[in-house]
Every structure is written in structure tokens, then in C-alpha cells.
Image (tube, rainbow, N blue to C red):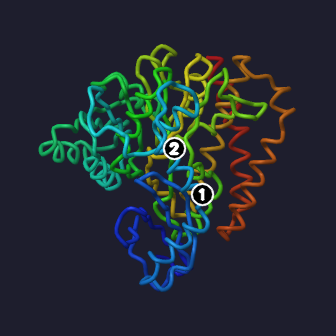
């Protein structure tokens, strides 16, 4: 750890033993606060934040805080778990999928997991170890090596695959995350295809939760899940976690163009509400029917990001459903270094700008509508201020300026590329 006070990250399942599990490093006397994900029947219920010291009483204090602060959420979960919904509706879908005890450990539907990576073998090794612990069958784990600079990734995957036939390797020579994702779709053995990144660790129940989501609703073309921080040791990690808020929704949700709409006037173009690219699964047929991932978007490509926002909104516009399921949980390793964070924040802005430019160019959304609903920009500004205050990161104002600049540069970049 650095010299700054760190926030320790842990997890406690109320049905388990009295131990709070560490997600990254052991707890030490340098940790001031602890943020603990509380689970019931392995379903995420909420966070409790409390003093990290003394560690000997942390589990007991976490239970007490959960019983007090999360009582309503716990009651809601128990109520969903005891219901016997038989026909589809938004609440019925929630009832069917809210509790991991109902999720299948195996079924006739196979799941292909695609991990897109580039020159990060150490992170990839951890990612694959987590996937190997997944409690679902049949499962395929496909590593897509995107424009690698050497053969380290191939050697790593080949060595692991010798002892695990579920794992295979493919190289996509065209740089860009969309190209890698499209390669994964074409290589996948099964029609249900899940995507995660090499800097994420999936929960053992992740594949089962995704399968449960698809099984409960035949119209679901995409299932997204919860993305929770694995570490909050540094200011950079805490800034990212507070700014992007991927791990704050603890109830399942359904989205479509008909009944299940978000209240925002920009819906469905406020695509960040659906989830993130580190944790989602699709029906391959549905994604291929709309043309796959846009090669102009995505990390490593000319627009540096936005391919996840784009595919989510295109799925909804095509008349299909996206279902968010928090039990489909992954742990993400945020950027701990301030330079890496700055580059990532700029890239996110760049990708967002490219995504918005595409919507405007295709006349799916008007510039007038975007400007009229400036409230969404105010919401983003509030999140930036909150992230700055909670992280105490030096140079945080420059991060906000960099992200906004990235939006404009990304929009111009996509417009220019679309003219070719």
C-alpha cells in the first residue's frame, strides 16, 4: 500500500461463516475504513462502510450494520426468494432470478466466455483462475489475444489449457476491442456468449446467474451484471469507483422500448444505465443480426471506447430486452496509478463522444434533444464533484477537464471516420 490511508474491501455472506473475505490484500493497521459487500444466499444486498479497526470484530460489526442499514433490502430479498412466479412480467422476472439458490449449476444451454486481452499476461492469469472456479457446466473459456506485441499471452493460455480443456486461444490481429469481441462471437461454441476483461475476477456464480437471466426471459438479448471494486487502496481507485458507479444497483431490472423504460428523457440513449463492457452476455444471433460490434468504437481502436454503450442501445432499438442482474457479479481492478487513471478517463470521454456522434449522425437522436436534456450533464458534473471530494486525488480538476475534452475530440474523431 501507499502511505495514504486506504479503504479495505471485503465481502460477507450472511449465510456463511464469521469471516469477512478479503478481495485484494489482507487487512492491516494502515486501513482506516472498510467497505464490505453484504450478501444473502450469495446475492449482493448492499454495502456497509465502517471503521476497519479492530479486525477481530469486523464480521460481528458488519452483521450488526447490515441488520440495521440493509434491513429493507434483506426483507425484499427474502420476499422474492419465497415467491413462486410462473409467468413473465417485470416483477416475475425479478422473482425468478433474484436468488442464486435458484440458478442452475448445469443445463442444456452452454455458455462461451470471451476474455479480450492485450499484453497483460499477469492480470489474465488471475482472471482465468477465477473463471476456472466458476460453478457452471457446460462452459467454454475463449481468450482473444488482440494485436499482441509478443507470444507471452499465447504461451500462458496454452499452458493453462493443457490442464483444462474448457480454455482455448485465438489471436485477432486487427487492433481494437470491437474487432476482438467480434472475433469472440465468431469463435464461440455456444449461442450464449459472455464478455469480461482481463482486469476482472468473476464471482463463481457468475455464469449460472447469466444463464438464469436468459432462461427466465426469452426476449432478453443481453444480460448485464454488477461491477464491484476489488480494491480501494489508492486515491485513483476511489476516484474511479465514485465517478462511474457501476456497483450501486442491487435490484434486478428490465429494459426495453415498451413497458420497461427508464424515466430519463434521453432513454434509451443514456446507455450507461444498462451496465458496463466488463460484465455482460448476449445471444449471439441477436447481436450478429444487428451487425456485431462497431469496429470504429472500442478501446485500442480509433474512438478509444464506447462499443459497449453502442451495442446496448442498438439491442434495445432493435426491439429486444436488456436485463440487469446484480448476482452476475464481477470484481474489477480499477486503475491504481494516477497516470493510468488520467489516460482511462480521457479514453472514456473519447468513447462517449464517439458514441454520441454516431447517434447524431444516424439521426437516432437530435442535437436539440441532447442539449435540451442538459440535466444529464449536470448529473455527471455532480458525480465528478463527489468523486473528487471522496478520493482527495491531486489534480482531480484536470481529470474532469480531460474527460470533457475527450468527449468533444471523440465526437469529432467519429464524425471524421464516418465520412471515409
Identify the residue under disc 2.
80
Secondary element at image label 1 = helix
> Residue 237, how many percent across, how many down?
55, 63
Tag 2, which secondary structure?
helix
**Which residue is rendered at x = 24% and y = 33% of the image?**
138
Q: Is residue 51 above or below residue 399?
A: below
| Sequence-wise first label, 1 or 2 | 2
Q: Which mark is residue 131?
A: none
In this view, the residue in front, 57 or 356, is 57
- Direction top: furthest residue: 289
Say if residue 4 shows up in the picture.
no
Mark 2 neighbour class, 10 Å CA radius: few under 14, some 14 to 19, many 20 or more: some
Q: Nearer the observer, disc 1 or disc 2?
A: 2
Identify the residue shown where x is 57% and y is 57%. Answer: 341
User: Could you tell me residue 18's position as x and y percent?
Assistant: 37, 73
Asked if marks 1 and 2 touch (Cβ < 8 Å), the reply is no
Image point 44% across, 82% down: which residue? Answer: 55
Measure the alpha-carbon separation of dots 1 and 2.
32 Å
Compared across the picture, whether 148 is left or right of 223 comes to: left
Q: Residue 193: percent from the left, percent from the top?
A: 37, 29
Q: Residue furthest left?
A: 162
Pick the front one: 202 or 399: 202
Query: Measured along the vertical axis of the image, is residue 60 above or below residue 139?
Result: below
Tell me if mark 1 has few (under 14), some (14-19) or many (20+) residues whose alpha carbon lies within 10 angstroms of its own. Answer: many
Residue underneath mark 1 = 240
The C terminus lies in which quarter of the figure?
top right
Is residue 256 in view?
yes
Amino acid at each position: 500500500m501507499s502511505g495514504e490511508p486506504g479503504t479495505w474491501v471485503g465481502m460477507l455472506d450472511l449465510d456463511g461463516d464469521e469471516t469477512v473475505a478479503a478481495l485484494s490484500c489482507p487487512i492491516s493497521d494502515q486501513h482506516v475504513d472498510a467497505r464490505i459487500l453484504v450478501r444473502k444466499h450469495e446475492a449482493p444486498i448492499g454495502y456497509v462502510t465502517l471503521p476497519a479497526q479492530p479486525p477481530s470484530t469486523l464480521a460481528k460489526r458488519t452483521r450488526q450494520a447490515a441488520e440495521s442499514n440493509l434491513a429493507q433490502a434483506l426483507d425484499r430479498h427474502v420476499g422474492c426468494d419465497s415467491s413462486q412466479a410462473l409467468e413473465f412480467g417485470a416483477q416475475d422476472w425479478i422473482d425468478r432470478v433474484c436468488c442464486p439458490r435458484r440458478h442452475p449449476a448445469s443445463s442444456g444451454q452452454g455458455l462461451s466466455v470471451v476474455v479480450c486481452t492485450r499484453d497483460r499476461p499477469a492480470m489474465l492469469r488471475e482472471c482465468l483462475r477465477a473463471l476456472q472456479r466458476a460453478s457452471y457446466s457446460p462452459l467454454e473459456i475463449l481468450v482473444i489475444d488482440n494485436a499482441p506485441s509478443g507470444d507471452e499471452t499465447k504461451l500462458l493460455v496454452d499452458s493453462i489449457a493443457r490442464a483444462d480443456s474448457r480454455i482455448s486461444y485465438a489471436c485477432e490481429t486487427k487492433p481494437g476491442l470491437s474487432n476482438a469481441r467480434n472475433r469472440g462471437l465468431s469463435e464461440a461454441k455456444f449461442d450464449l456468449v459472455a464478455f469480461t476483461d482481463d482486469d476482472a475476477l468473476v464471482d463463481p456464480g457468475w455464469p449460472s446467474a447469466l444463464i438464469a437471466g436468459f432462461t427466465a426471459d426469452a426476449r432478453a438479448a443481453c444480460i448485464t451484471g454488477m461491477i464491484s471494486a476489488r480494491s480501494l487502496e489508492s486515491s485513483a481507485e476511489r476516484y474511479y469507483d465514485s465517478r462511474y458507479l457501476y456497483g450501486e444497483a442491487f435490484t434486478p431490472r428490465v429494459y426495453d422500448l415498451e413497458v420497461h423504460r427508464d424515466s430519463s428523457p434521453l432513454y434509451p440513449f443514456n446507455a450507461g444505465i444498462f451496465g458496463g463492457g466488463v460484465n455482460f452476455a448476449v445471444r449471439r444471433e441477436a447481436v450478429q443480426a444487428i451487425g456485431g460490434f462497431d469496429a470504429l468504437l472500442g478501446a485500442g481502436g480509433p474512438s478509444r471506447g464506447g462499443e459497449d454503450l453502442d451495442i446496448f442501445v442498438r439491442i434495445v432499438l432493435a426491439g429486444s430486452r436488456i436485463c440487469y442482474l446484480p448476482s452476475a457479479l464481477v470484481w474489477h481492478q480499477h486503475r491504481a496509478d494516477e497516470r493510468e487513471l488520467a489516460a482511462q478517463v480521457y479514453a472514456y470521454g473519447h468513447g462517449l463522444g464517439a458514441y454520441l456522434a454516431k447517434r447524431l449522425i444516424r439521426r437516432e437522436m437530435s442535437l436539440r434533444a441532447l442539449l435540451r436534456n442538459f440535466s444529464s450533464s449536470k448529473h455527471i458534473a455532480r458525480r465528478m464533484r463527489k468523486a473528487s471530494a471522496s478520493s482527495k486525488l491531486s489534480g482531480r480538476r484536470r481529470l474532469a477537464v480531460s474527460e470533457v475534452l475527450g468527449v468533444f475530440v471523440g465526437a469529432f474523431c467519429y464524425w471524421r471516420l464516418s465520412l471515409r
